[in-house]
Image (spheres, helix red, strand yellow):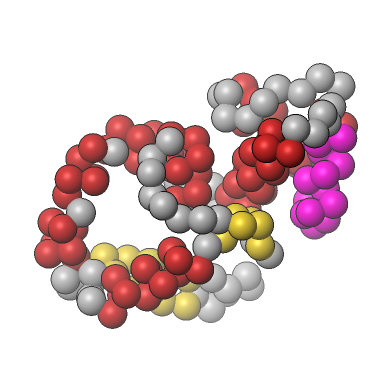
């Protein structure tokens, strides 16, 4: 979600993301989450289920930490709300696909490669082989329709 906030809304977070197992990742953010947990502002719990994962919830010391970030939160409130409204209901798997598509779209632009729709879907499939081409195409179309990624001709 932070990656999407940074890339789609232009909010400056100063995190440097790279592509990793489950999409864009930065150890910097993980370190910050550990720090905020140690300060008692959040609770991070491992969830035992078929897929595993983590639940992050407010901690007992949330307010003092939130107060320190109040200026940033107020300045970026609309962007944060937009990203949460757009992507907050997605599962981790759905976020993984969409954030990877955004990451690869930016990477293709930076490298000045010229990929048509099928070429781009093939690139995403190569990076994320567990997703079907249909699922990739559907997520790509959603992101294109919202102008989050470049539209590609077939």
Up the image or down, 11 lies above or below 153; here it is: below
* Range drawn in magenta: 119-132
Up the image or down, 16 lies above or below 29; here it is: above
* Residue 42 rendering spot, x and y as whole percentages: 29, 69
Q: Please tell me which residue lies in front, 17 or 81.
A: 17
Residue at 77% over, 54% down: 128
In the drawing, does residue 109 fall left or right of residue 76? right
For the view shown, which residue lies furthest in the front direction? 111
* Residue 102 rendering spot, x and y as whole percentages: 62, 40
Q: What secondary structure characterizes most of the magenta part?
A: helix
Residue at 14% over, 62% down: 63
Counting every numbered tag in the picture gives 0
Up the image or down, 67 lies above or below 53; here it is: above
* Residue 105 visible from this viewpoint: no
Q: Quadrant of residue 146?
A: top right
123 inside magenta stretch: yes
Residue at 38% over, 40% down: 11
* Residue 128 visible from this viewpoint: yes
* Residue 95 rendering spot, x and y as whole percentages: 58, 49
């Amino acid at each position: 979600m932070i990656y999407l906030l940074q890339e789609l809304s232009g909010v400056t977070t100063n995190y440097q993301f790279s592509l990793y197992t489950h999409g864009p990742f930065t150890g910097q953010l993980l370190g910050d989450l550990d720090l905020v947990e140690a300060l008692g502002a959040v609770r991070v719990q491992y969830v035992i289920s078929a897929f595993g994962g983590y639940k992050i919830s407010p901690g007992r010391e949330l307010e003092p930490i939130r107060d320190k970030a109040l200026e940033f939160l107020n300045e970026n409130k609309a962007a944060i709300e937009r990203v949460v409204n757009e992507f907050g209901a997605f599962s981790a798997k759905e976020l993984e696909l969409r954030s990877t598509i955004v990451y690869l779209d930016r990477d293709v632009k930076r490298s000045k490669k010229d990929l048509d729709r099928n070429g781009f879907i093939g690139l995403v499939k190569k990076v994320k082989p567990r997703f079907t081409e249909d699922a990739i195409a559907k997520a790509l179309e959603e992101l294109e329709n919202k102008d989050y990624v470049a539209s590609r001709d077939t």
